[in-house]
Amino acid sequence: METLFVLYDDRCGLRTQLKTWLLRQPAYVRLQPMPAASEKARRRFPGLPAGELAAFSDTGETWIGDRAWIIVLWALRDYRAWAAKLASPALSLARQAFAAVSRNRSAFSRWLELCGEAELRVPLDQVPVPPCELGDKP
């Protein structure tokens, strides 16, 4: 595997922040985050479950939900050992915690005052952008 596509909900502030965090981490494989609702994601990954974190490798494997989070951690240099621990059947509690956070991510986003990328685009789309002016001004 050389690339791991990570599809996330860009309306969710928590998931948007996690995407930003992921891009700062050293990784064993290239991570390519993509808003799940984007045309590119729908075209490339048809049938994607709505609102679920999903990961797809360039070699064809698919992970959804807590398993997607585990494979993303596996791809990160500083978190591969954590991925192995969390994948253990003995740690089903960790998977249950992921599921609880995932189900309540909107509430977490509100509590942490996090804004999703899609939410930020709405007011910004209303701002007129003046054309660039080149040349010397007197």
Image (cartoon, rainbow, N blue to C red):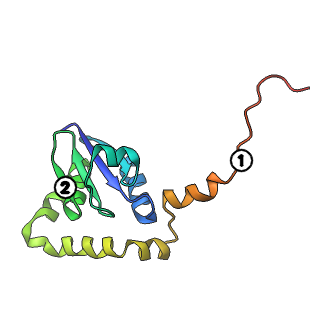
Q: What is the crowding at mark 1: few (fewer than 14 residues within 10 Å), some, or many (at least 20)? A: few
Q: Is residue 121 above or below residue 105?
A: above
In space, the residues marked 2 and 1 are separated at their CA atoms by 40 Å
**Location of mark 1 (residue):** 128
Q: Residue at x 27, y 47 (%)?
A: 45
Q: Is residue 100 visible?
A: yes
Q: Earlier in the sequence, mark 2 or mark 1?
A: 2
Judge from the rendering whether residue 129 lies leftward or rightward of residue 5; answer left or right.
Answer: right
Q: What is the crowding at mark 2: few (fewer than 14 residues within 10 Å), some, or many (at least 20)? A: some
Image coordinates for residue 90, horizontal then vertical, percent: 8, 72
Quadrant for the N terminus, please.
Answer: top left
SS type, badge 2 = strand
Judge from the rendering whether residue 48 lies leftward or rightward of residue 93; answer left or right.
Answer: right
Give the residue at the far left of this rendering. Answer: 89
**Location of mark 2 (residue):** 63
Image coordinates for residue 129, horizontal then vertical, percent: 70, 43
Q: Amino acid at mark 2?
A: Trp
Image coordinates for residue 126, horizontal then vertical, percent: 66, 54
Image coordinates for residue 32, horizontal then vertical, percent: 33, 43
| Viewer-nearest residue: 122 or 82 | 122
Q: Residue at x 30, y 50 (%)?
A: 6
The quadrant in which residue 79 appears is: bottom left
Res. 51 mark:
none
Q: Is residue 79 visible?
A: no
Q: Amino acid at mark 1?
A: Pro
Marks 2, 1: nearer the viewer: 1
Q: Residue at x 27, y 61 (%)?
A: 49
The answer to the question of whether label 2 and label 1 lie on touching residues, with beta carbons closer than 8 A, is no
Judge from the rendering whether residue 5 lies leftward or rightward of residue 109; answer left or right.
Answer: left
